[in-house]
Image (cartoon, coloured by chain):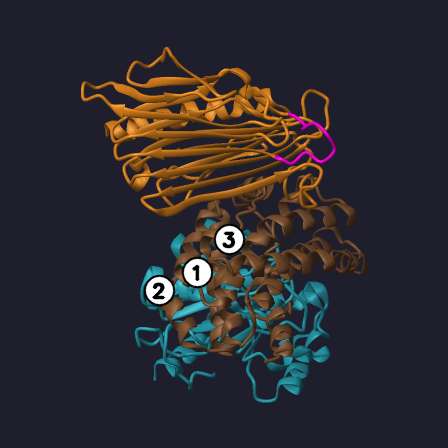
Chain colours: A cyan, B orange, C brown
Amino acid sequence: MHLDHTHTGPAAVSADSARPDGTRRALRIGLGGPVGSGKTATVAALCRALRDRIAIAVVTNDIYTREDAAFLLRNAVLPPERIQAVETGACPHTAIRDDISANLEAVEDLEDSVGPLDLILVESGGDNLTATFSKGLVDAQVFVIDVAGGDDIPRKGGPGVTTADLLVVNKTDLAPYVGSDLGRMARDAAAQRGDLPVVFTSLTGADGVAPVADWVRERLADWTA
Amino acid sequence: MSVTATARITAVADGRGSTALPVLESEGPLALRRTRSPDPAYTRVTVVGAMSAPLGGDRLAVEVLAGDGARLTVDSAAATVALPGAGPDAVPASYDVRLRVGEGAELHWLPEQIVSAYGSELDLTTRADLAATARLVLREEQVLGRHGERTGRLSTRLTVRRAGRPLLDQQLAYGPGAPGGWDGAAVLGGHRAVGQLLVVDPAFEDALPPPRLLGPCAALTPLAGPAVLVTALAADARLLRAVLDEALEGLLKETTALQEA
Amino acid sequence: MTTRAALLVLADGRFPAGGHAHSGGAEPAVKAGRIRDARDLEEFCLGRLHTTGLTSAALAAAAAQGLDPLALDEAADARTPSPALRNAARRLGRQLMRAARATWPSPELAALAEARPRGAHQPVVLGLTARSAGLEPADAAHCVVYETVSGPATAVVRLLSLDPFEASAVLARLAPALDRVAGQAAEAARHGIDALPAASAPLLDISAEAHAAWPVRLFAS
């Protein structure tokens, strides 16, 4: 979490914890990970789990815009005005890490247009294992991988697996079918990540997103403390 | 021998619901005729005669003033064909159009095409100054080369100010001697007819139509003020006119409905 | 004062001001089949340079020179009939403003940000950024003409898988023209707002509207 420094003047520096009017801005959590690991499904499930008590909005960074935004809209997890898509010029990692200006504009616009928000989820387009979010854009990041992508991903490491504030290993229900060893994934992840948390999810199960939702609630509690 | 000539039109509301023409001055090749208007609410002037051929070195100008409350249509009898000047050191021809439209006045400036013949050089400048409540319908069409002919050099500038503030400013330049890339994928893409249709109406102030495409190479765009610009490209003059005519008809219906509302 | 390195920082494609997500009209031109190879790209860039490139560079030079940025913003509106392009220019202006205030903060930048919270036209912000960085109007113009062609070139490398060496060779071939247009723009800016060029490109205006209406696209403009 990097929420300490504030800056005066309108929309000046990205990591400011306050909005120009002095109120606390929403907590921003980034979700990244390889294509098909279940980032959008995780975002949708989080919205459903949290939306009754928490004011949420979502920014999507599609490789080919609006697919993910359209999925969230179709599934009506949030009203349309709370979902905004950012074009990334075919480079999602640039938009979340190297040049975050379009994403910052999107999160600020959401707060301006739909009123006070508690949480903004910034979903990256599917990318590779090195994609991480800039600390100027998000306060914490979640990296989503899945068991079907190969149980050696945690061992291989990479900035996403190693440094994300939360590692989600998704689709555990598929482990027996793809021959993935969950125990090995957990051990490798622990070796790579030290004390950083890892959760295993199966979004097809009832309340499958609960471990992620709990973690988000804790981050929110810290943020508003 | 090059020609310098200025034609002048002043239109004023006559106080009885019609528009009078206290000034209607032809000069040289620019001959003006009052012609019958299909809509009696508008007075119509047609530019006739040899205006259809500015040669290299000619300096032609038309000045139109539509005073407060006047309703005037100005059109032309034929296309204006820019032709090369005599001799190798001929200078470009210039054609300056100056339009002023007063409070509550309405001007329709609907000349025929400018055709840029091979070897010609023409600089066309159109400047419109509009009062805050003025209405303007303006059409400009540039055709690059006569049938099957390569184009000359044609530069245009269209500047429109409303209540003293800039509303539209556009320069176009085509043909041999124009800056590079004019026929490439950013500018003309091989098209040989280019047109603009501008409708300025205070009724658009709170009701600007959204942008829309009018075919593969034409778009209707709301400007940053109460005005709409149609930009169109076509293979030839006839196809271009068809797009602009249809757009004009739709826009006039729209403004009439807004004015009545 | 020589500030060549500051110019490199500002002109760097990695300067975080949002440009990477914009193709400068190249995406619709590729889709329409008007850009198929390096040759088409060069013609496209040349046309863009001599139209919106010149116009934007002069606006930037004028802002760098200290002309009223709000009057320049209005002049930019009048020179941008396409609402999709006005919108893109203001979004990019807002994004650049953020980067500019983090890199070369100045009261003039703060005042413009205050007056145009949704963003001023990007060339105006760029000119003011150059001014805050101690750069000359000609530097601002150079910066604009370069991004006028480098944006589409980078986009076409991604869209057509064009050989990046070929794309860079296109940019190198355009360099003398870039210098010339930057010089023209800086010269025009010396004569006040009314003397600024307004060169425009019909196809860029039309295709920007078409592109903005696509349900799915890679680039924001």
Per the rendered image, the range of residues in magenta is: B83-92
Q: What x and y, as percent, mark residue B32?
A: 43, 18
- Label 3 sits on what residue type? Leu
Q: Main secondary structure of the magenta part?
A: loop
Examine the structure image and report whether residue A219 is included in the region drawn in magenta: no
Q: Residue at x 72, y 68 (%)?
A: A179
Query: Label 2: which residue?
Result: C115
The mark tally for this picture is 3
Residue visible at 67% across and 30% down in the picture = B120
> Residue A157, position in %: x, y?
69, 79
Can residue B171 be seen in the rendering of this structure? Answer: yes
- Mark 3 and mark 2 lie on one chain; the one further toward the N terminus is 2
Chain at tag 3: C
Do we see residue A212 in this rendering? no
Examine the image and state in which quarter residue C107 appears: bottom left
Do tag 2 and tag 1 residues touch (Cβ < 8 Å)? yes
Q: Residue at x 39, y 60 (%)?
A: C70
The amino acid marked with disc number 2 is Ala
